[in-house]
Amino acid sequence: MSRNPIIAGNWKMHKTPEESIKLANEIKRNTFKIEDVDIVLCPPFTSLTDVKDVIQDTNILLGAQNMSWKTEGAFTGEISSLMLKSAGCAYIIIGHSERRAYFGETNELVNKKLKTALTEGLLPIMCVGETLKEREAQKTFDVVSEHVHKGLAGIEGQDIIKVVIAYEPVWAIGTGKTATKEQAEEVHAFIRENLAKKYNSEIAEKVRIQYGGSVKPANIEELIKEKDIDGALVGGASLDAASFVEIIKGANKCYTPS
Ligand code: PGA
């Protein structure tokens, strides 16, 4: 079964609308020949519609970094799925570790957001992953399993195949310390086994699992060659067009459609 790779750039709280237009244009100019990799740009909310205009009629897709689990109402400061869809988003990042760590997002909230996204027609990228303390205490598999099972509670088989799971060990995010390909593959395979148990192996084989945490041009190829690594969620290296494009090209080079 071949899952085509998905490379998403999480710009986090970087780039004004003007800077976003420039970056998106540079990425667009250098990726127009790439057809087998799903490319997703996740700029800040204030740049979504500008980036949408830049990437229209290309194979690049738009994503947002967060959304409310509520669909409408008196929720000051929140952004709904309907607003994101109308701004051109296809994808939505849910439960990023920075949201869990700094904004108190729990597995229960992640699950609510996931359900809203699926009901409202956005494709979720659900982030899971352990902290350094948890890894050192040999709790990686417990934490990841809890993130996966609680995050996906009540999600049916026909919906899970729309979800991308991003394994992002917190200790590797923004630190320059990438998990080795063996460390990453071990957890990706574990996630897929969990999906096979929760759903079935046919469904588990269809779900794309991205790796995230200090992905750069120098390590994308070895990571993506691993059996259960289907792409990357890229932070820092996605803010520079040249390095993000190299990552996309690296993923493209290693992919052979079956
Ligand atoms: P990084 O961030 O590539 O800068 O480590 C990844 C992420 O947080 O998604």
Image (cartoon, rainbow, N blue to C red):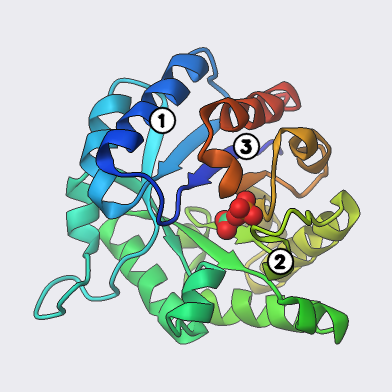
Q: Position of residue 110 (x, y in %)?
A: 45, 76
Q: Residue 183, located in which quarter of the rendered image?
A: bottom right
SS class, disc 2: loop
Q: Give the amino acid type for the residue marked by disc 2 in the picture.
A: Pro
Mark nearer the viewer, 3 or 2: 2
Instruction: Specify whether 238 is left or right of 212.
Output: left
Image quarter where the C terminus lies is: top right
The answer to whether the residues at label 3 and label 2 have Cβ atoms under 8 Å apart is no
Alpha-carbon span between mark 1 and mark 3: 22 Å
The residue that disc 1 covers is 23
Pointer 1 or 3: first along the chain: 3
Residue at 62%, 31% in the rendered image: 243
Could you say which disc has been placed on residue 5 in the image? 3
Which of the two residues, 242 or 209, is positioned nearer the viewer here?
242
SS class, disc 1: helix
Q: Is residue 240 visible in the rendered structure shown here? A: yes
Residue at disc 1, CB closer than 8 Å to ligand 1 = no
The residue that disc 2 covers is 169
Dot 2: within a 10 Å radius of its alpha carbon, few (fewer than 14), some, or many (20 or more) residues? many
Alpha-carbon span between mark 1 and mark 2: 27 Å
Instruction: Specify whether 77 is left or right of 199.
Output: left
The answer to whether the residues at label 1 and label 3 have Cβ atoms under 8 Å apart is no
Residue at 13%, 72% in the rendered image: 72
Q: Is residue 43 above or below residue 192?
A: above
SS class, disc 3: loop
Mark nearer the viewer, 1 or 3: 1
Instruction: Specify whether 57 is left or right of 218.
Output: left
Q: Position of residue 3 (x, y in %)?
A: 65, 39
Residue at 27%, 44% in the rendered image: 47
Ligand 1 falls in which quarter?
A: bottom right
Image quarter where the N terminus lies is: top right
